[in-house]
Amino acid sequence: MKITKIDYAATGAFSQAITDYLCRSEKLQPFYNRFPAPEVFEVQLKEKHFSQEQRQTLQQVLLEQYKTVTEVNPKVQQNIELLLQPNTYTVTTGHQLNIFTGPLYFVYKIITAINTCRVLQEKYPDYNFVPVYWMATEDHDFAEINHFNLFGKRYEWQTEQAGAVGRFSTAGLEQLLDELPEKFPVFEEAYRNSKTLADATRAITHALFGDYGLVSIDGDHPVLKQALTPVIEKELTENLSHKLVSETSAQLEQAGYKPQVYPREINLFYLKEGLRERIVQEGEQFNVLNTDISFTREEVLQRAKEHPEEFSPNVILRPLYEELVLPNLAYVGGGAEVLYWFQLKKLFETYEVTFPVLMLRNSALYIGRSNASRMHKLGLEPEVLFKDYVELKKHMSLVLHEEEISLEAQREQVAAAFAQVEQLAQEIDPTLTKSVGAEAQKATNTLQMLEKKISKARDNKHEQTFKQLENLKEKLFPGGSLQERYDNLLSYRTNNPDFIAELAAAFDPFDLKFTILEEE
């Protein structure tokens, strides 16, 4: 496996805000706590406070949730036990419960969290570091998780269920399994034998990453939600997060960056079986949208106190919830996630919760053996493949020792000649200047037409080469997007059973570079 690292900026696929963050731009420094580097964790470890009572609660919940796993991997079991120790901390990533793991970046997130723990374990041997996957079980956007792409074909789960997706029955997924081109044991076992999508997703991540000690946690739990009760109360009575996040977002805009998320006055959903709807205050009443459910101020506060599990944080409050129930040091996210965490710093400070180190997940371009062969036959290096197709075609022309077709010099000569003719006409009969101008335009148009014809003739000469180039570009950048945002894990692991292990060996969470992996 050949590994090449390039700057994120060189890919053209990441926002200016992210490339500025990676360059430690001073404009962004007020919006995060510490820049991701192994040495900053010495202070982060001292700053993060997590009581023994909190550890006992966390372990109790994890032991309960892992009862759905048939045989818990010893490394996972050990990490759950270690969480009871005061010198054990976590590195967390979170993601929706995409069926069949969804796009590749889900896998990249988890591997980044795993590798961050590995690096920290080497640097701080007196501590323990546990990689955690926070399952977004309370998310209700089914359309975002109900499909995946495999070998260029879209597969979609159809169900009429509603509410938090983690509570969905797996009924109907067996039909999708039967549609696949072959059997995939990890997913067959999970979807046919699990009652809920949350249980199935835990089974899948355990099967894929159990050997790395990954612990998956479901925040949709009554015991965990008790930690959120004070936040729920302030949210309902003071609209606190709306005020704080709005202030930070305005400062971020002043620094030249667009906010990723926009807070509501109440950043909570009401959560019941088959239901997750926003809570809004209308006068003295707290209503649940699209339902007949309504509370007075006293009733809703009493409900929050007695049943916090019925309140679900949205994107604004979920990060705070994660940090309240985990001894967490760092959060691993994609570009958009890292940016919306920037909007939350003041919220964390107000609640006196340590702001985690924000780790940009590793990103990669994986070039299989057949595509690598095509690439080399075309005389290309992987770095140039990030150009758009038009630029790539120009580059290919240079590789083929063909200069770009341009008749610009000839147009300038013709224009100069007609300018002389026009001057002569002006001196003899000014009425002729319009005719000269018209003929000059005709000549210019003729040259443009000839330029296109000659370019097309040259392209036809290398039609097969350009077609190969176009096919290679589409294979590696489906739909013009990064591979990791479209392709599914099975598209690669099917042909390469060591795919995950090779990613784990190649990714360095602290080098802050885009990774190109090329099969040799």
Image (tube, grey):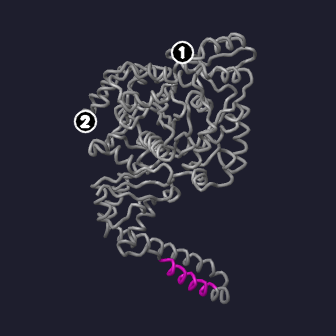
Crowd around label 2: few <14 · some 14–19 · many ≥20 (10 Å): few
Q: Which mark is residue 272?
A: 1
In the image, residue 66 lies at what x, y percent?
A: 41, 23
Q: What residue do we see at 65% from left, 14% from top?
A: 305
Q: What residue do we see at 71% from left, 11% from top?
A: 296
Q: Relative to residue 215, is residue 428 depicted above or below?
A: below
Where is mark 2, residue-wise? 181
The type of residue carrying mark 1 is: Lys
Front label number (2 vs 1): 1
Mark 1: which secondary structure? strand
Q: Nearer the viewer, residue 205 or 12?
A: 205
Mark 2: which secondary structure? loop
In the image, residue 317 lies at what x, y percent?
A: 62, 30
Looking at the rendering, the stretch of residues picked out in magenta corresponds to 407-422
- Where residue 97 sits, quadrant-wise, is top left
- Left or right for 40, reference 286: left
- Residues under labels 2 and 1: Cα distance? 37 Å
